[in-house]
Image (cartoon, rainbow, N blue to C red):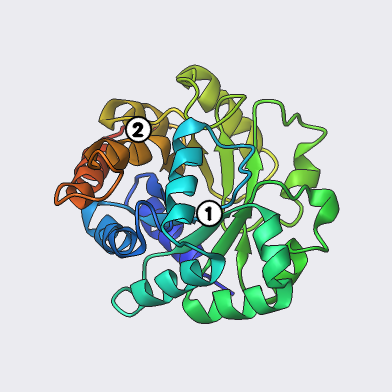
Amino acid sequence: MTTRIDARFAKCAAEGRAALVTFVMCGDPDLATSLAIVKALPGAGADVLEIGMPFTDPMADGPSIQAAGLRALHGGATLAKTLALVADFRKEDAQTPVVLMGYYNPIYVYGVDRFLVEAKAAGVDGLIVVDLPPEEDSELCLPALSAGLNFVRLATPTTDDKRLPTVLRNTSGFVYYVSITGITGAAIPDYSKVADAVARIKGHTSLPVAVGFGVKNAQSAREIAAHADGVVVGTALIDALKNSLDAQGRATPATVQAVTDLVSDIASGVRGARRAA
């Protein structure tokens, strides 16, 4: 079965370019603004949407994304409302892939079977659940694949050739390579090492490899897009959103455009990259 994620990466490859994958947190700073941002992202140049599922203890996230999750939770965001946001987005966009990203606890509490049924019905295409290792595939990964959802795995600089086959075994859609060791938004990657890492991962899989962490602007996106099948940006978008808020942390008339302007800039870098042979 070909998913929207498969189709979009294939389309970008046919165009000779990397895909731009954008991350925003559902409900940040409020649900209405969040929906407006998500609806505007494809037009700004996003190829795949990653939407964060707010959680109280996001241990793999840096300060910016942690703060986004807290703003969302304070604004009333829940897992059910995250699924509703995707369903609202799908009323106007049937093509753009949507990946939900987050942690297992909210899904476990919601109920795995119920979550998968409702996620599929809402129009979700894939999941990234950062705290479920391959050894726990029976918990969510295998049921998600059976439900027709892609299950995207993370690989890092410390994922060696011995570990990679285990990580990739039930991965589908794409592989998300985290180009630095540590939390999100923490440092700038070494682009030469990114190229080597992508090549190493591709020695184990035919899936597209998307690279994230450290993408802040068109130039950094262009550097990564030259070597990867996808470029992931998250923290920079969250920071642009935060900087547009008023003193009380509420959305302003500039909030949606602050995010989409940065996405347009980064998209220009992705599309302007010279792909490595």
Mark 1 burial class by Cα count in 10 Å: few <14, some 14-19, many 20+: many
| Count of numbered badges drawn on the protein | 2
Answer with left or right where residue 102 lies relative to residue 158.
left
> Which residue is drawn at the image coordinates 45% and 20% (left, top)?
188
Please name whichever residue, 193 or 104, is drawn nearer the observer in this view of the structure.
Answer: 104
Q: Position of residue 160 (x, y in %)?
A: 75, 29
Is residue 35 visible in the rendered image? The answer is: yes
Of mark 2 and mark 1, the one earlier in the sequence is 1
Which quarter of the figure is the N terminus placed in?
A: bottom right
Q: Which mark is residue 39?
A: none
Which amino acid does the dot numbered 1 rest on? Answer: Pro
Is residue 14 visible in the rendered image? The answer is: no
- Per the image, the residue denoted by label 1 is 54
Location of residue 204 with respect to 11 vertically, above or below:
above
Mark 1: secondary structure = loop
Please name whichever residue, 113 or 74, is drawn nearer the observer in this view of the structure.
Answer: 74
- Per the image, the residue denoted by label 2 is 221
- Which is more foreground, mark 2 or mark 1? 1
Please name whichever residue, 248 or 204, is drawn nearer the observer in this view of the structure.
Answer: 248
Mark 2: secondary structure = helix
> Which residue is drawn at the image coordinates 48% and 46% (left, top)?
70
Q: Position of residue 226 (x, y in %)?
A: 39, 32
Which quarter of the figure is the C terminus placed in?
A: top left
The quadrant where residue 114 appears: bottom right
The quadrant where residue 143 appears: bottom right
Circles 2 and 1: CB distance less than 8 Å? no
Location of residue 130 with respect to 186 vertically, above or below:
below
Q: Position of residue 218 (x, y in %)?
A: 27, 31
Which amino acid does the dot numbered 2 rest on? Answer: Ala
> Which residue is drawn at the image coordinates 70% and 57% (left, top)?
105
Q: Position of residue 155 (x, y in %)?
A: 65, 38
